[in-house]
Amino acid sequence: MRIISLAILLVLHLVPASLAEEGHEEEETLIEDYFVCRTCGNDVSVANLLFDKYSPLALSATNHTLTEGRSVLIQEVQNSRGFRYTIFLVKQASCQKITAQRWIAKSSWFPGYAWKFCMCPKCRMVVGFMFEPIETATIERNFPSDAGFYALIHNSIITEGYVNSLLMKEKVLREN
Ligand SMILES: *[C@@H]1O[C@H](CO)[C@@H](O)[C@H](O)[C@H]1NC(C)=O
């Protein structure tokens, strides 16, 4: 499951060029950490794909250690209905494919980009938002192109590193 759901992310962004071209050179990409859906535990993205981009509409922006040894830009944004989300950005994520879901150019936190919701492919909870440049945000496009990106909702995602630390704590508590 993990291999299937993340295959696209890895092929597009993490496979070293030499491996893709030659096909026989043994090079491996170390996954720094997994971002999983808080509701069902499905893989959503990996820490290797984090990147920072400031939203001019953010209510706040802070650097945060989301995953071991890496500082991430966490921003608080508000939608037109007054709902606030705390988000961080990744270049790729797995979202449920919903055909004919329109990109919305209005009230985008990133000017020049249209958006739509990213729902967990397994449990369908909203885990974030997809962004695509307005010019290429066509109805046929289900997911962002290389020019687009994903914003994940901090409260909807946990890191595998954190899950493991909880399991470890539980194990220690049980043994004492
Ligand atoms: C976050 O850290 C980067 C790199 O150290 C820095 O350039 C940036 O100004 C920081 N941003 C905030 C909001 O603190």
Image (tube, rainbow, N blue to C red):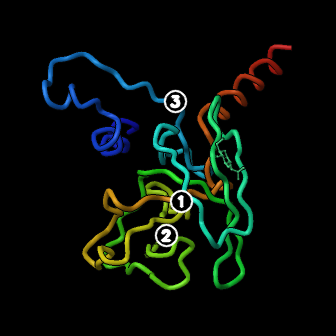
Q: Nearer the viewer, mark 2 or mark 1?
A: 1
Crowding near the residue tagged with mark 2, few <14, some 14–19, many ≥20 C-alpha atoms within 10 Å: many
| Residue 113 on image: x %, y % | 44, 73
| Residue 133 on image: x %, y % | 37, 71
Q: Residue at x 40, y 78 (%)?
A: 103
Residue 153 vs 32, above or below: the answer is below
Q: Which mark is first along the chain, 3 or 1? A: 3
Q: Which residue is mark 3?
A: 32
Q: Which residue is mark 1?
A: 151
In front of the other: 40 or 150: 150
- Name the disc covering residue 104, or none: none
Q: Which mark is first along the chain, 1 or 2? A: 2
In front of the other: 66 or 123: 66
| Residue 130 on image: x %, y % | 45, 65
Q: Secondary structure at mark 1?
A: strand
Residue 2 vs 125, above or below: the answer is above
Q: Residue at x 62, y 35 (%)?
A: 70
Distance between mark 2 and mark 1 Cα atoms: 9 Å
Disc 2 residue type? Phe
Q: Which residue is mark 2?
A: 117
Disc 1 residue type? Ala
Q: Nearer the viewer, mark 3 or mark 2?
A: 3
In front of the other: 33 or 14: 14
Disc 3 residue type? Glu
